[in-house]
Amino acid sequence: MSGSAVADVGGVSPLLIFVLFGAGFLSVLLYVFHAKRARAPILDLKLLRFPTFRAGIVGGSLFRLGVGAMPFLLPLLLQLGFGMSPLQSGLLTFVAAIGAMGMKVAAGRILNWFGFHKVLVVNAVISALFIAAPALFTAGTPIILMLLVLFVGGFFRSLQFTCINAISYAEIDQAEMSQATSFTSAFQQLALSLGVTVSAAFLQLSLALRSATNLVTGDFMPAFLVVALVALVSAISFARLPRDAGEEMARRKRVGSAAVAVANSRS
């Protein structure tokens, strides 16, 4: 594998980028203005009054922005930077999904041991480090080490997603659940898309600073570090949650389990 593989990338007008971002920002402001006055807005901003839901939206979006860049940056690095074939790249990145599936077995115990608050804060930091880790990959990095980093990173990222998705609805009652689900889904898709946008923008910035049109391996490091930093900032939102955040949901689960146990014992 060669560490000097390059790819010719067409430039995008900076003016067009600023116009598109400006239009997007204006659209958000207009929707906020509309949602505050509409009787039944599609995305009900009043749901943000709940601390856990607000943390799930704000912190979760920042974290997803960082994670959303990975499926874009990593295959580019492996194929364009290290000269791997699409098959080799796919087999290497697939190991992250295996780590994510392995997390499902351990998530319950981890949350029982440490609680939502601590897991969300500490795991955001750990996950951000693993998002940044590919910035240190080189053409000479052993494949087994890449596999290990991607596997463990997939485990911790999946754990964070599980916690975010669970705690976001801890204070939401059944009447508002459908609105909360729509709100969350919209921001999830937006954050993942922004992850690709931000990482692509920094790749383009690296090209502009070098006055080049060819991507080289060094162009990927700033992009990985920036999206990892964004994911790391999500820890601030989670740290502001009460220490007992999520306990309401845990109590409902314990009460529900107890009720089922009683019903089974009577049958």
Image (spheres, rainbow, N blue to C red):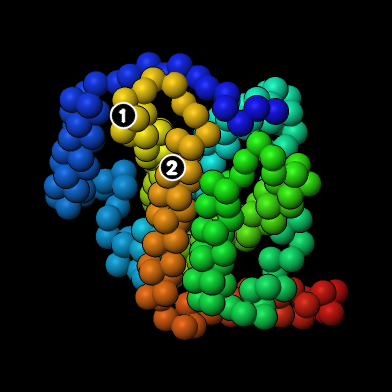
Question: In this rendering, does residue 44 appear at all?
Answer: yes
Say what secondary structure mark 1 lies in: helix
Q: Nearer the viewer, residue 217 or 58?
A: 217
- State the image quarter where residue 211 is shown: top left
Question: Which residue is denoted by mark 2 in the rendering?
Answer: 223
**Residue drawn at (19%, 48%), measured in percent from left and top?**
32
Which label's residue is closer to the chain start, 2 or 1?
1
Q: Quadrant of the C terminus?
A: bottom right
Image height of 185 relative to 107, above or below: above
Amino acid type, callout 1: Ala
Mark 1 closeness class: few <14, some 14–19, many ≥20 residues within 10 Å: few
In this view, the mark in front (2 or 1): 1
Question: Which residue is denoted by mark 1 in the rendering?
Answer: 208
- State the image quarter where residue 208 is shown: top left
- State the image quarter where residue 127 is shown: bottom right
Can you give x and y, in whole percent of width and height, for residue 231 in the image?
A: 45, 56
Image height of 167 relative to 182, above or below: below
Q: Quadrant of the N terminus?
A: top right
